[in-house]
Image: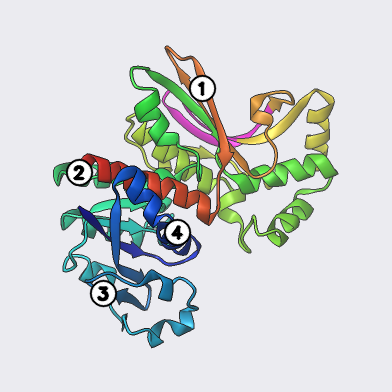
Amino acid sequence: MIMNLAIIGFGNVGRAFARILLERKQDLEKRYGFQSKIKGIFELNGAFINEAGLNIKDIINLNPNEFEKHENWKSKVSANNLIPKLDIDIVVELTHTNIKTGEPGLSHIKTALNNGKHVITANKGPLALAFPEVQELAKKNNLYLRFEATTGGAIPVFHLAETALMGNKIISIKGILNGTSNFILTQMSRQNVPFSIALKEAQELGFAEADPSLDVDGIDAACKIVIIANSILKQNVTLSNVKIKGIRQITKDAIELAREDGYVIRHIASAENGKLEVSPRLVPENSTFAIEGTQNLIRFETDLAKEIYIIGRGAGGREATSAIISDLLYIHKKTQ
């Protein structure tokens, strides 16, 4: 059975996903019996549409100003209008995160689920704001909603919880969920520089956006801990339930005082004792939580396995694609 796909959002992650799906075509078929066609790729101002399957080689290297020259490009069409009409099995929703309304991703997810399409998303906004609603919609329509790429990049947070830790009661989850903040705190400590200098370096290296608010103010990590709490701990929470404190106020003096006492400062997200929090915390300098650079870390506290740590790359197009493809193969296996 060939799985028909549509991609909504063709930025860094969307292009990486399409490219790797093309590169791994034979390997995925040989190892998993997985075959696919991408029938639609949607952007804000139009879409590439071909019911017989798009020639991805022709599209992945195009600049946005070249889209309209392609024979399969349709201007001024929207995903919400066309997704119900296309013969699509899975919608891969990869638009930009909006933490105020969740749009346009939230509408894309609802449209897909209301029209018989499974959904894979890397978009944190809709799930941070409306997880119970969209999860219930997927359940009602007997569809899969998968979101491994929303949290931890390539780290298999949700797959680990639902497979390898089956039979365990997961008591709490704590982690470093934003690589940008971790890089900044690492550089402040290593180089004895203030927040502003470390932030500038992060921006120059491409780790931080021109407006770094979502990262350094803790919003990105808060979105992720909400998704974790809802999915793994079976809570019913949204972003408004998280106590959030960023790292802008961390000073060189605070970093130095921590070092003198054998500690480092890390930006920790936690879901424990029914409370969700993102805040700077002191951790022993020899602790697993003292990881440096842009890596992410998550610790599961369980009743049987006790503490389980996973560490890995938390951002990047190829890293996100690793998570998206694992979700794709999950749905493929479950629907055969």
Q: Earlier in the sequence, mark 4 or mark 2?
A: 4
Q: Secondary structure at mark 1?
A: strand
Q: Secondary structure at mark 2?
A: helix
Which of the pair 71/140 is nearer the observer?
71
User: What residue does disc 1 label?
Assistant: 308
The amino acid pointed to by label 4 is Glu
Q: How far apart are labels 4 and 2 at the CA level?
A: 24 Å
Q: Residue at x 64, y 29 (%)?
A: 289
Compared to 2, does 47 lie above or below? below
Q: Earlier in the sequence, mark 1 or mark 2?
A: 1
Q: Provide the major secondary structure of the magenta segment.
A: strand
Q: Earlier in the sequence, mark 3 or mark 2?
A: 3
Give the residues in magenta: 268-282
The reply, left or right, for residue 287 in relation to residue 313 is right
User: What residue does disc 3 label?
Assistant: 50
User: What residue does disc 4 label?
Assistant: 23
Q: How far apart are labels 4 and 1 at the CA level?
A: 33 Å
- Asked whether residue 13 is in view, the answer is yes
User: What residue does disc 2 label?
Assistant: 335
The amino acid pointed to by label 2 is Thr
Q: Earlier in the sequence, mark 4 or mark 1?
A: 4
Q: How far apart are labels 4 and 3 at the CA level?
A: 20 Å
